Amino acid sequence: LFRSLDCMVHHLANRPEQQALLRDDPSLLDAAVEDMLRRETPVMMVARVVKHDVEFGGQQMRAGDSMAPVLGAANTDGDEFDDADSVRFDRSGNRHLAFGAGPHRCLGSHLARMELRVALDEFHKRVPQYAIAAGSTIQFSPAIRQTNDGLPLVW
């Protein structure tokens, strides 16, 4: 949850127009959370083991092979999402994979969504326009999960 919120606040800190939309119209929070989960997901890839021989995208995979589906890439697939590289608060039919899918889907996904909506709503009720502090460099780790060492905000 904290990594997702961190990614979302980082995204919004660089987009005052989207902050204003959330302040002015909290009914956009559901769609905003979903599209930020899609585009700014902290979990970039997951480790899996192939259960049955299969060919996918021209690649033969055998039962027992290790694989690492890249959720971040799937969530920005232009065949699935119009304007895939942009966060849009009007996106509908948002079939992202931020919480995985199938039997490996995150059991806490519904609770996480609710917590993210409440956190963003309360944050935007209390904090005026905010931005990343001047001169700050935010480094996200390029590992399996995006994370950083801090998010210096000013408002």
Image: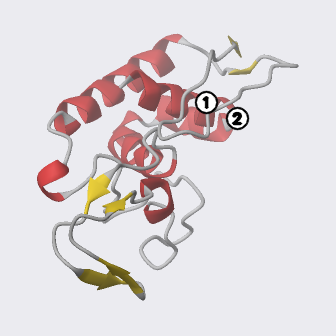
Amino acid residing under circle 1: His
Q: Position of residue 35 (x, y in %)?
A: 43, 50
Q: Foreground: 20 or 132? A: 132
Crowd around label 2: few <14 · some 14–19 · many ≥20 (10 Å): few
Q: Quadrant of the N terminus?
A: top left
Residue in the picture at 41% in, 74% down: 80
Residue 142, picture quadrant: top right
Q: Position of residue 120 (x, y in %)?
A: 42, 25
Q: Is residue 94 visible?
A: no
Q: Is residue 98 above or below residue 19?
A: below
Left or right of 118 in this view: 87: right
- Helix, strand or loop at mark 2: loop
- Disc number placed over residue 120 in the picture, else none: none
Amino acid residing under circle 2: Asn
Residue 96, picture quadrant: bottom left
Left or right of 1 in this view: 127: right
Answer yes or no: do the residues labelled 2 and 1 have beta carbons within 8 Å?
A: yes
Q: Position of residue 105 (x, y in %)?
A: 19, 48
Q: Which residue lies under the disc numbered 1?
A: 10
